[in-house]
Image: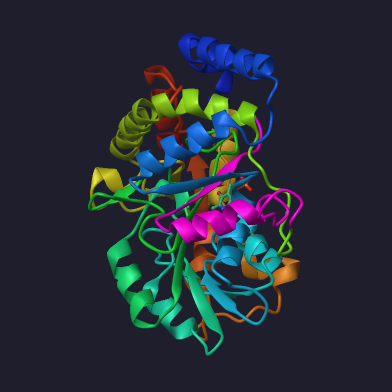
Amino acid sequence: MSDVVMNDFRAEPAAIRAEMLEAARDVFESGWYVLGKQVGAFEAAWARACGTTHAVGVGNGMDAIEIGLRALGVGAGDEVVTTPMTAFATVLAILRAGATPVLADIDPATGLLDLASVERSLGPATKAVMPVHLYGRIGDMPAWAAFCAERKLHLVEDCAQAHLAQWQGGVAGTFGSVGAYSFYPTKNLGAIGDAGALITGSAELAAHAARLRNYGQSERYHHPEVGMNSRLDELQAALLLVKLKWLEEFTTRRRRIAGQLAEGIRNSLVRPLAAPVAPENHVHHLFVVLSADRERLQAHLREKGVQALIHYPVPMHHQKPCADLRRDPRGLAHTERHAAQCLSLPCHAQMDEAQVARVIDAVNGFR
Ligand SMILES: *Cc1c(COP(=O)(O)O)cnc(C)c1O
């Protein structure tokens, strides 16, 4: 019996494979490989799916954040308050934009950035707040939008783990100035390589971002500002267009599996994170449990043929480039505890019922 793994791309339906190969062939035969019709079509489709007007395809999720911040004019001398419980790319993108990250603590129930801690972490140089929709979960974004509007701060959402997660009908990335998405292969909507996009309701911001991704070029061979090379290529855009048609079905499947895991796991040593307020608030990029005995739990699962990974074992304030960053004056105790206890169990759309049952049995058999 093969292991239950965190992701299993080769188990995707044959129909999706066939259609992707067809789409790839079309791109080859078109003879046009960078920033063309496929990118335009994917940008339009992704903006529509998010319920907004503009999407700008870029090289990856990290660049989507950096370009979003730069398009907003956030850079040297500016601070961006974010969470230490995230992928390093979140913080690296802020640094690459020339700005300075400030770290606020999380809400221990959800793992998401805590508004009260963000408030304590603000300073005169704060220009933006960047919540991360961690594990596929989204919080009360109208509250965040109001908080930022009152203080004239930009709200930038890191949506890399939360494709089309919703709060009261609004989609992740549409509550503030910019939303940044990654289409790294393991994300809920994944390319066959690196890809990303930022979304915005502002035509002006979108046009600025489109210049920044392409050397800061306004018209051919004219460069009024220092941009970068972060273009989404035609092949990835064409493949993403195919995969986008399956996203809703795959999200439904993830929700079902997450429900089964939450229901089935009965072990006093293992506690799943809080359930979402409503099903649409969570797209279950990762199914995370907490355990005071996390390393032994992970080893036990491995022995039972169940892969489990830690997101994330080293919070940002313990990363060397972040050692001197300002943080909530009350400290980051909830983040510390979460990082020491969290474990992600397999929860992806290609799992079958038997695999879900194996995960539940393996967790419940932990003593
Ligand atoms: C994956 C991820 C990113 C970065 O995306 P890439 O496409 O890998 O650059 C940023 N933030 C979070 C929370 C992520 O999970």
In the rendered image, is residue 304 in sight?
no
Question: Which stretch did the figure color magenta?
Answer: 193-222
Quarter of the picture containing the N terminus is top right
Image height of 308 relative to 125, above or below: above
The chosen color scheme is rainbow
Q: Is residue 214 magenta?
A: yes
Which residue: 43% across, 64% down?
Answer: 177
Measuring 45% from the left and 84% from the top, which residue is drawn there? 120
In the displayed structure image, the side of residue 211 where residue 334 appears, left or right: left
Residue placed most toward the observer, 298 or 191: 191
The picture places residue 246, in percent across and down from the top left corner, at 40, 24
Residue sitting at 44 percent across and 48 percent down?
Answer: 54
The picture places residue 102, in percent across and down from the top left corner, at 58, 76
Q: Nearer the viewer, residue 163 or 71?
A: 71
Q: Is residue 203 magenta?
A: yes
- From the viewer's perspective, is 135 left or right of 87? left
Q: Is residue 261 above or below residue 133?
A: above
The image position of residue 250, as x and y in percent, is 39, 27
